[in-house]
Amino acid sequence: MATDLKVNPLISRMLVARNIESFEEARTFFRPEIAQLHDPWLMKGMDLAVNRILRAIEQKEKILVYGDYDVDGTSSAALLYQFLVKICPRENLEFYIPHRYREGYGISKLGIDFARSNAFDLIISVDCGIKSVDLVIYARTLGIDFIVCDHHLPDAVLPPAIAILNPKQSGCAYPYKELCGCGVAFKLICALSGPLSIPMENCLVYLDLVAIAIAADIVPMTGENRVLCFWGLKKINENPNHGIRALMTLSSLAIPASITSLVFTIAPRINAAGRMDDARKAVQMFVADGYEEALTYARLLHADNTDRRETDTLITEEALALIEADDQMRNRKSTVVYQSHWHKGVVGIVASRLIEKYYRPTIVLTRSGEFASGSARSVPGFNLYEALHACREYLLGYGGHFAAAGMTLATQNIELFSQKFESVVSETIEPRFLIPELEIDAVVRFRDLDFQMFRIIQQMEPFGPENLKPVLIARNVLETGYSKLLKEKHLRVFFRQDDLVISGIAFNMADKWPLIQSGQPMDVAFTLDVNEWNGGRNLQLKILDFRPHADEAKWMADPPVDAANIPDNSASF
């Protein structure tokens, strides 16, 4: 690869790790083009969906766009609503977002009854509906047609909708299977634009919404998702949706925004609406006609996120205290914690935070009406859904997938469930899954690191699953004696290798300060970053972890690459 592409071997190793093995594949990767998107008509059911929507518009039927309360669901609803409102009377169109606590996930009976009470003829669900067989049947008995646009894995029995758009459904020839819900909605408006003689540019204006949904839904950053996200990020940084711009302003998000900033800054504010209150206002923000109107709703989301942050911090502290105070709980291979007063909207976040401290499958429960309900999070490699299935005798209901799930149970069964879950995890989890891992892209020496490499790594964005930001490791480095402890939480470190010194920042690693002071050689894992200060611009390490140098390094699959004397022409991409 390095020879064929005339690139630094370190870069070529990163590309090969991403299944990019030729010049053409590399060019496609580095220069995503709209022309690389697949024909939407390849998606099974697209002709049926388009024809039914065109008939509804022609006959002036009322259409309800039905979304979900997370980022993917609200952005999907906003995208489809904004497109349809330009081609049918506003009085014939509405959107509906279920309330997390009153209705739960996906299609609800309350939502269908809303459609009946308001004389809607057609419901188009986005990011939900593929498992709502009984509710789609119920809608049919009321004379309401359904089009389901979803991306979740279908069951064997599908809802009897007029059309189902889901690339994962059996018999669908659509080439790319990993679209998020908003991606499926985008393919629908692309197909609709043809018979309506609407220019493709009128669909591309919504790519900022698609990019945020892709980032937040943690779908693979490959194929079409990479193309959609690349151009969506471009729109976010040049001319974003009024709601996105308002959130960027309120959160002081620096331009250019990256996928990382969307995931950790914008997405939590959108999700907070459904976690703490009503997610409908997230769609209202996205579809606002002007910036000031969008800003009004964005302020509500911003406030919800502040409440959410305070709430999950408090609950996390309480949960950690419960574990620390119980020797038996602290030494388990799973975590199950319950308090009746905990806020239901943040228990999933708390479960993730507990895994950061105790790396093991975790469930956080709270009271919900007469029952207990909660969220579960797993560690990589352990199938959480199967573990819950093995505990089903104590559950009233459960659902989810390999890495995350939810459940409901009687409060009197919490202890029995906790014991059974611990037993199942202990018997089935492989010990290696209880040890956190960092996957390393390449071994480097400090002399390999320069702004040319940094620029090429930047061109590998957008980053996400299956295209994570490259993680590098430098072995046998020494601390210089100039490192500092910052705010009793973070570390500013200075490492030396081959007479070269590079600084690094290690967030929330104050507990490793004694290792820094020990003076022993270390191996440091990091991503490459830039520190801009007082007009200067220097490379720095964003440190992910470090530990005493391992001479044998049997844990490494590849030897270091000496790239010092190889010309790097990778800017040609």
Image: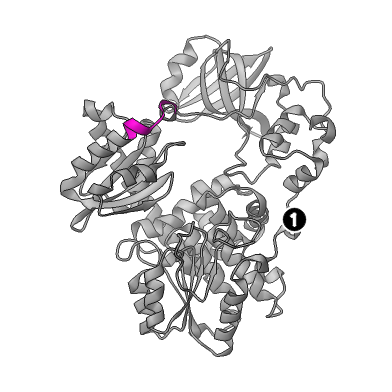
Residue 145: percent from left, percent from top:
47, 80
Is 338 situated left or right of 218 in this image? Answer: left
- Residue 69 picture quarter: bottom left
Residue 86: percent from left, percent from top:
60, 79
Figure disc tally = 1
Q: Residue at the location (40% across, 55% down)?
A: 272
Residue 224 magenta: no
Residue behind mark 1: 33
Q: Main secondary structure of the magenta part?
A: helix
Q: Residue at the location (37% across, 33% down)?
A: 428
Q: In this orientation, does residue 563 appear?
A: yes
Is 93 situated left or right of 528 in this image? Answer: left
Q: Which residues are magenta?
A: 425-432
Q: In this orientation, does residue 307 appear?
A: no
What amino acid is labelled 1 in the image?
A: Glu
Residue 429 magenta: yes
Q: Is residue 318 above or below residue 190?
A: above
